[in-house]
Amino acid sequence: MPPVNIREFEAVARERMTPAAFDYYCGGAGDELTLSENERAFRRITVWPKVLVDVSQIDMATTVLGERVDLPLLIAPTAFAKLSHTDREAAIARAAGAAGTVMTVS
């Protein structure tokens, strides 16, 4: 079964990445205070799923700068992309394209 939440994605990443690369992407700077505050802020958000709703035809598409994207999540630039894949930014751009979204540039 594919991962469906951040903790499951982290478990997959931990298996596939070197410990140094995993720590870089899953950690924060300094004492990780901002990381802790971000996690605390997300815990305050409650998502109430709708039940007994027909989800056989879901369209999450939107537009970004007038262009249609199938997935309303954009991939932001990340330092040291080579830590996540040997093809670096090219692999990230291919993954964004396969998901129907875009990779932004800094």
Image: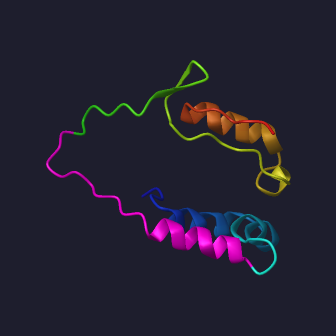
- Residue 44 inside the magenta-drawn segment: yes
83 on left or right of 97: right
Above or below, 22 relative to 56 = below
Total number of numbered discs in the rendering: 0
Quadrant containing the N terminus in the rendered view: bottom left
Quadrant containing the C terminus in the rendered view: top right
Give how far across and how far down residue 81 sits, in percent.
81, 50
Q: Residue furthest top?
A: 66
38 on left or right of 93: left
Front residue of 67/70: it is 67
Give how far across and how far down residue 91 sits, in percent.
74, 40
Q: Residue at 69% across / 36% down in the picture?
A: 103
The coloring applied to the image is rainbow
- Residue 79 inside the magenta-drawn segment: no
Q: Residue at 61% across / 22% down in the picture?
A: 65
Q: Residue at 66% across / 42% down in the picture?
A: 75
Front residue of 57/85: it is 57
Front residue of 9/77: it is 77
Give how far across and how far down residue 38 sits, in percent.
60, 68
- The magenta stretch is 32-54
Give how far across and how far down residue 92 sits, in percent.
72, 41
Q: Residue furthest left?
A: 52
Above or below, 36 relative to 3 = below
38 on left or right of 8: right
Front residue of 59/92: it is 59
Snapshot quadrant of residue 77:
top right
